[in-house]
Image (cartoon, grey):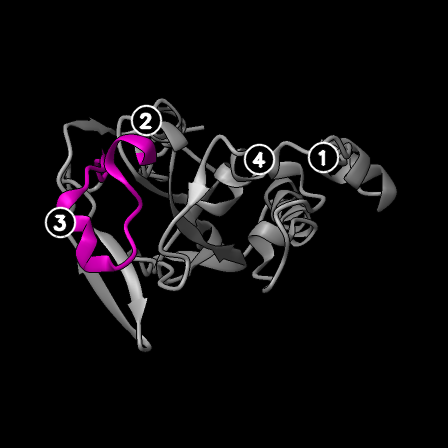
Amino acid sequence: MSDRAVDMVREAVDCAIRVGELQDSSLVARRIGTFESITCAAPSYLERHGEPLTIDDLEGHRAVHYLSDRTGRIVDWSFMVDGRQRDVQVKGMVSVNDGEAYVKCGLKGFGMIQAPRYMVAPYIESGELKEVLSQWTPPPLPISVVYLHNRHLSPKVRVFVDWVSELFQQCPLLSGCKHMEYDTTCDFAGKKRRAISVREYLEGREMVDAAV
């Protein structure tokens, strides 16, 4: 797994999961979920710097910066304000290019973060992170599974696409469900419910011989 956008032809990748509007029109895409982010910070950071009450308050705060794998530049924060997207540059001293490292830096109090809801949900629930500016949420982004255009789609790719689509729909934090609580059953958010494996998915649909 990687935050980097792979070259599916050059690197011989069967399919990939991508977030946001797709740039490559040569790929076949299937929408499988919704990517939602929240703005949050560790209590230790808020004790030192206070809690921002408005977007303008971010001028006096620090963020952990996330570097885009596509441009190499810092990704600005975004908020939905009165139905329109507002991008904001927040000062910071630490920059990373990996989602796990990004959240870890937020947990350590290096700065505020604007992170995927499914990644920070357990820490919000435990109190290790606190959501701020909740009335101005970042715009949601589509999640798609993409694969190369081929009229004769291989069984293994077809089965994987069906399986990952079903898996995403089982997770409220990624399926686009609204008004949910953090304490919800979600395999992606570290809950203990056992996720079905690819093999079990195949066996349940009598597709093992075709895909293996």
The spot of residue 72 in percent (x, y) is 15, 36
Residue 61 within the magenta-colored segment of the rendering:
yes
Judge whether 12 appears above or below 181 on screen: above
Q: Position of residue 99 (x, y in %)?
A: 37, 32
Q: Which residue is mark 3?
A: 59
In the picture, measured across the screen, residue 191 lies left or right of residue 61, that is right
Mark closest to the chain's N terminus, 3 or 1? 3
Badge nearest the viewer, 2 or 4: 2
Comes first in the chain, label 2 or label 1: 2
- Magenta highlight range: 46-68
Tell me which amino acid carries mark 1.
Val
The residue pinned by badge 2 equals 109
| Sequence-first disc among 4 and 3 | 3
Q: Quadrant of residue 111?
A: top left
Does the stretch in magenta take in 66?
yes
Residue at x-position 14% and y-position 28%: 93
Q: Which residue is mark 1?
A: 198
Q: Nearer the viewer, residue 120 or 187?
A: 120
Q: Quadrant of residue 206?
A: top right
Would residue 208 appear left or right of 110 to someone viewing this image? Answer: right
Residue at the disc numbered 4: 122
Q: Nearer the viewer, mark 2 or mark 1?
A: 2
Amino acid on which the number 4 mark rests in the picture: Pro
